Amino acid sequence: MENKEFKTRDFYLAACLLAYGLVLKKLQLEKNKIATFIFNDPNNIAEKIITDHWNRKNKIPTRDLIEAIVELKTRIHNGI
């Protein structure tokens, strides 16, 4: 099985992907404090989730989205 990844620098798209259950494989912080979020995407679903996001078709429970945002912020500030 190929280890497929999806990368984004968009914080809220990353939160959306995390809330949908994609696993955050790695967080890369650059010197200018820009974060790159790298997700495992073995089934190539990230693109569909993002397309649905931009077309306002995603149905994410608000609590899941808030928890994803909090987790990403914590990971950024702790550098993990």
Image: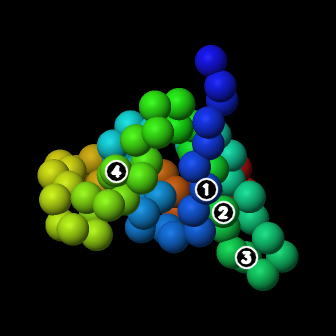
Q: Residues within 10 Å of mark 4 (few under 14, many from 20)?
A: few
**Nearest the camera: 78 or 51?**
51
First-in-chain label (4 vs 3) = 3
Checking the image for residue 36, the label placed there is 2
Please indicate, yes or no, whether residue 77 appears anywhere in the rendered image. no
Q: Are marks 1 and 4 in contact (CB under 8 Å)?
A: no
Q: Are marks 2 and 4 in contact (CB under 8 Å)?
A: no
What amino acid does circle 1 point to?
Lys
Is residue 32 at all visible to an observer of this figure? yes
Q: Secondary structure at mark 3?
A: loop
Of marks 2 and 4, which one's residue comes earlier in the chain?
2
Q: Image quadrant for the N terminus? A: top right
CB atoms of marks 1 and 3 within 8 Å = no
Q: Residues within 10 Å of mark 2 (few under 14, many from 20)?
A: some
User: Residue 20 in the image: x percent, y percent?
Assistant: 33, 43
Query: Which residue reaches farthest top?
Result: 1
16 lies left or right of 35 = left
Q: Position of residue 3 (x, y in %)?
A: 66, 29
- Residue name at image x 15 percent, y 52 percent: 59
**Label 1 residue SS:** strand
The amino acid on which the numbered mark 3 sits, given as a three-letter code, is Lys
**Which residue position holds label 1?**
7
Q: Position of residue 2 (x, y in %)?
A: 65, 25
- The Cα atoms of the two marked residues, 2 and 4, are separated by 19 Å
Q: What count of labels does the image hold? A: 4
Along the horizontal axis of the image, is 46 left or right of 77? left
Alpha carbon separation for disc pair 4 and 3: 28 Å
Query: Is the C-beta separation of discs 2 and 1 under 8 Å?
Result: yes
Circle 1: is it few (<14), some (14-19), or many (20+) Cα within 10 Å? some
